[in-house]
Amino acid sequence: MSTLIDATEQDRRTPTDALLEVEDLNVRFPTEDGVVHAVRGVSFTMRPGEVLGIVGESGSGKSVTSMAVMGLLPGSAQITGSVKFRGRELLGLSDRQLSAVRGKSVAMVFQDPMTSLDPVYKIGVQIAETVRQHDKSVSRQAARARAVDLLKMVGIPNAQDRIDAYPHEFSGGMRQRVVIAIAMANQPEVIIADEPTTALDVTVQAQVLEVLKTAQEETGAATVLITHDLGVVAGMVDRVLVMYAGRAVEKGTVEDVFYRARMPYSIGLLGSMPRIDAGEKQRLTPIKGSPPSLINPPPGCPFGPRCPLHYAKCDEQEPDLLPVDGADHTAACIRVEEIVKTEVAAEDIFSQDSADTTLAAASAIGAGAEDEAIPIEEIVAQHTDQDAPATGGASTVGAARNDEAAARRDPEARA
Amino acid sequence: MLLYSIRRLLASVLVLIASSALVFVLTAQTVDPLSVYRTRQPPPSPIFIAQKRAELGLDKPILQRYWDWLVGVLHGDFGNNINGVPVGPVLFQKLGVTSRMVAAAMLLAIVLAVVVGVVTAVRKNKASDYVATIISYILIALPVFWFAVLLKVFVAIKFNELVGRTILYTASEESPGISTYGTAGEIFKDRFQHLVLPTIALAAITYAAWSRFQRASMLDVMSSEYMRFARAKGLPYRKVLLKHGLRNALIPTTTVVALGIGAIFGGAIITETVFNWNGMGRYLTQDGLGQNDINVVTGWLIVSAFFIVLFNLIADLLYAVLDPRIRLS
Amino acid sequence: MATDVQQVTAPPAITETPVEREFTVESRSQTQQALRRFMHNRLAVGGLVVWLVILLISFIYPHFYGFTFSQQSDALSVGPGTAGHPFGTDDLGRDLLARMMRGIQRSTYISVLFVLIAGTLGVTIGALAGYFGRWVDNVLMRIVDIILTVPILVAIIVIAANFPSARSPLGIALFIALLGWMDLARIVRSTFLSLREREYVEAAHALGASNRRIILKHLIPNSLGQIIVWATLGAAAAVITEAALSYLGYGVQGSDTSLGSLVAIGAQAAETRPWLFYFPGVAILLIVLSINLIGDGVRDAFDPSANRVR
C-alpha cells in the first residue's frame, strides 16, 4: 500500500504543471434528427489539488464533457480537440491504454448511485476489483483490507461486515459513499464527480459532499465537480466554469463568478438561487425559456433569445470568451464592458415573475431584436419601473440592492 | 439460501402432484381406451363394453381411479398397456433414447445461444451481427420438421453420396441389433453417427430463439450505468463485458432456457418422427394416442412433467445463485 | 400579481423570431417518434412490405385465378410451370398455388385469433400476478407452473387426437391459444414485478392513481416492447405449431387446408415431388420471417435506448 502512495507523491513534485488540460473539446452525436453538437469548444486546465466547478442547466453539456474526458462516450460520438493528462493525449488512446488511466489517475463518481454499482457483486468485491485491476501485485486479502479501510474513510459503519453486503442492501447515500470509496481507491490525481448529489435526498446531500471533500483531502486529487447546484459549488470549489448550450460562457475564480458575474446567463443563474449572503429581502429571478436545441443552432449568442440585454448584433456571431477584470476571469458576451461598468445584477434585468408560459412572453423582457443596443442603465430603469408595483415598497428593494452592491465590491471583507 | 432451496423443493413436489392430477384428468377426459371395441363390426354388445369398463376400472369414480394410479406410479408401476405389457420399463427405455438427443441438443443450443447472443450484442449493427441475425431469423421462422427434412434429404444424403459411404445416418437411433453384437466402442460410434443430424436439427431451431433473447438481455445490461462505472474504474471493455455484462445478462436467460425444456420435449417428438427414432415421440403418438392407450399416455405425460418440474427447480435455484436480490429477499 | 405585470408587458404581436431561433426541430409525440423510427428501419419496413404483399396476393388473387384450392384436374403431380400450374400440382391434380393461397388465408386467421386470445389471457394473468404480488401472484403462477408441466405441443396433440371433429382452423386456433398464453403471462409478470418498484410507479401511487390506471397507463405501456415481441414470436409460433400438428397428423382436417398442412404434406414428399416441399416451406419461411422482422422493428422503435448502446 505504502509503495503506491509514495509513487504518486513523487509524481506530484511538480505542482506548477497542469494535470489535466482540455483544449477545444467538441462532441457531436449523430441522431435521427441531425447531428447534436453537445459540447462546443470547451477548454479548461486543472492544476494539482485544485477544485473546478462546472455549472449549467441540464443539457448544457456538462456530463458529456466529463464522459469525453474519461473516454466513456458511446462509439457513435465524434470527439475532437484535445484532452491531456500530464501532457499525454488521452483522445484516440485504445480502450486498454485508457483503462490504465481510468480509475487510477482519473477517477469518476457518477450521478445515480442506485445504478452505478453492479447488483450481483458484493461491494467489497467491487472495491477490491478496482484496486487489483491497477496493481496486480496486491493480494486478495490486501485488496479486501484496503476495501474495509476505504469504507471506513467514507463513513460506512461496521465496514468490516458491510463489505460483504450487496448494493441493494444499501441506501442511496450509502451507495454513493461506496462509489466515492471506489473512486478514491487508487489515490487518483483527478476525481470527476458528475452531479454526485443530484439523485440523493437533501439531507444526505451534505453528508455526501463532506465525504467527497474527505476523499479530495485524503487523495489530494484535483477535483472536477459538475453540478447545477450553485450552493454545492460555492462551498467547495476554487474556480468555476459556467456552461451554456455546450459552450463555456464564463470562467473565473469562485469569487469572480459569484460576486462579479459578467455573462448575462451567469448573472441570471445566480439570480435564480437563494443566497445566504444577500440580504433578507433577496428576490429570486428565474431565467425564462429553455436552452436551445443543439441541432443546427442559429448563428449568434445561444443565450440571445432568453437574454434581457439582447439586441441585433448578438445574433451575428457567437461571442468568444473575453477577458474581464483579471486575466483569469473571462465571459462570453459582447456587452461585457458595459456590464462591468454598470455592475448589473440579476434582479435589475431579469423579471422576477415565474410565469413561463410561452417563449414569446419571455422575449418580451428584452429579447426583442432591437437594432441598436439599449443602454443597460435604460433597461434597468425600465425594469425597475415595471417591477416596482409588483413588490411594493421600493425602498426595501433599494436597500437590498445596496447591500448586495456592497458585497459585490468587497467580497474579501465578507470572507 | 438453504431455506429458499427447501421452499422451492417443496413447491416443486406440490406442483408435480397437482400436475399428475391435471395429467390424469386430461387423459381420462380425452382418451377412450374402449374406442377399439366401439368401432368394431359388428358392434359388441353393451354387456361386453360394460365388462371391459369394469376390467379396466373405468367404472370407478375418477378420484378413486386417480388415487389407484398415483399409488401405482409412486411404487414405480405405471400400469399395463392395452396388450398387458407393463408401461414403466418400456417408457424408461424410450426415455434413455430420447435423452441422448435432447441432452446433446440442449448443450449445443445453450453454448451457441450464449456465444452468438453476446457476440451479436457487442457487435451490434456490424456485419457479423447481421449475418447471425439473419440466420437465427430464418431458423426461428422454419418448422422444425421442414428444416430436419431439408437437412436429411438435401444435406446428409448428398453428403453421404459425395463421400461414398454412410457417415451420417438419417434414420433410427442406432443400427438394428448393434447393441447385441457390437463392442462398446462400435456402439458408441454408431449411436453418435445416428445422433448428429437430429441433434443439429433440434439445436439449431432451439438456439436461434435463445440467442435473440441473450442478445436483447445483453444489450439491456450493456446500457446500464454500472457497466459504464465499471469501465470508469479502469476495467478494460472486454473484462467489463464478461465479468459484469455477461454475468447479469445470463440471469434472465436461465429462466428462458429452463422453460424451453418443455418445448424441447415437443420438438423432440417431431425430430424423432423425421429421423424415425424409436424414442418417446413414437411411443406417445403410435403406441399411446394411436392405440388410445391411456396408461401409455398418462405415463408419458407424468415422466415429461417430472423433467419439466425438475428443470424449473434448477432454474429457480440458479436464478437465486446468480441474483443476490432474489436470494436475500 | 406578477402575472398581471407579465400580461401588461407582453404585447400580443411579438411571436416572430425567437420561437424559431429556439426550436428548429418540431416536437413529436412518442407514437409519432416510434412510427418514424420504425419507418427508418429498413429490415422492418421490408418485412412489412413482404408480409402485406403475401397477404394481398393470398386474399385477392384467388378471385382472379383459374383454379380453386379444391379443384382437381387431370394433371396429377406435375412440376412447376406445367399445364398452366405455376407451382405444379399435388397427387390429386390440385393446383399448388391455389392451395397455398387458401392455406395462407387460413393460417393468418389462426395466428391472428391465437394472438388475440392468448395475448389477452397472458397479459391479464401476468399483470394481475405481477402487480398484486402476494397470494394472487402465488395462485396464478402456480396454476401456470402446473399447466406448463405438460409440453404445449403434446397437450394439444392429446386433445386434438381425441377430438378429430374439432380440427377446423377455429378449433386449432383455440387449442393453441388456450395452451399458449403462459409464457406471456410469465414475461408480463416479471416485467411488472420490476416496473412496479420504479420511481414513477411509486409517484403515481403517491398521487392517488388507481391500480387500474397504473397498470394501464404506466406498466403495460412500459412492457409494451416485450408484449409486442411476444405477439410476433407468438403469431409466428402459432403458424409453426399448426404446421407441426399437421405433420404429426393432428392438423386441420377435412376439405379445408392450411399452410401448415401443405408444408407437412410437402415434407413427406420431399424426395419424390420436391416442389411440394419447397414452395410451401419458403412461403411459411417468408411469412414468419416478415412478421418477426416487423416485431423487432416495433420493439426498436419503442425502445430507442437499445440503439444508443455501443
Image (cartoon, rainbow, N blue to C red):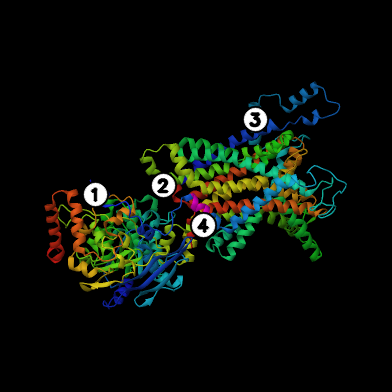
Determine crowd level at label 4: few under 14, some 14-19, many 20+ residues with C-alpha closer than 10 A: many
The CA distance from mark 1 to mark 4 is: 55 Å
Q: Is residue C183 magenta?
A: no
Identify residue type, mark 3: Tyr
Between A119 and B221, the residue placed more toward the observer is B221
* Furthest-right residue in this view: C74
Residue labelled with disc 1:
C5
Marks 1/3: CA–CA distance: 84 Å
Q: How many marks?
A: 4
- The disc labelled 4 sits on which kind of residue? Met
The 10 Å Cα crowd at callout 2, few under 14, some 14 to 19, many 20 or more, is few
Look at mark 3 in the image and give the residue it sits on.
B66
| Mark 2–mark 1 distance (CA, rounded to whole Å) | 41 Å
Q: Is the stretch drawn in magenta largely helix, strand or loop? A: helix
Cα distance between the residues tagged 4 and 2: 21 Å
Q: Which residue is mark 2?
A: C198
Provide the secondary structure element on which disc 4 rests: helix
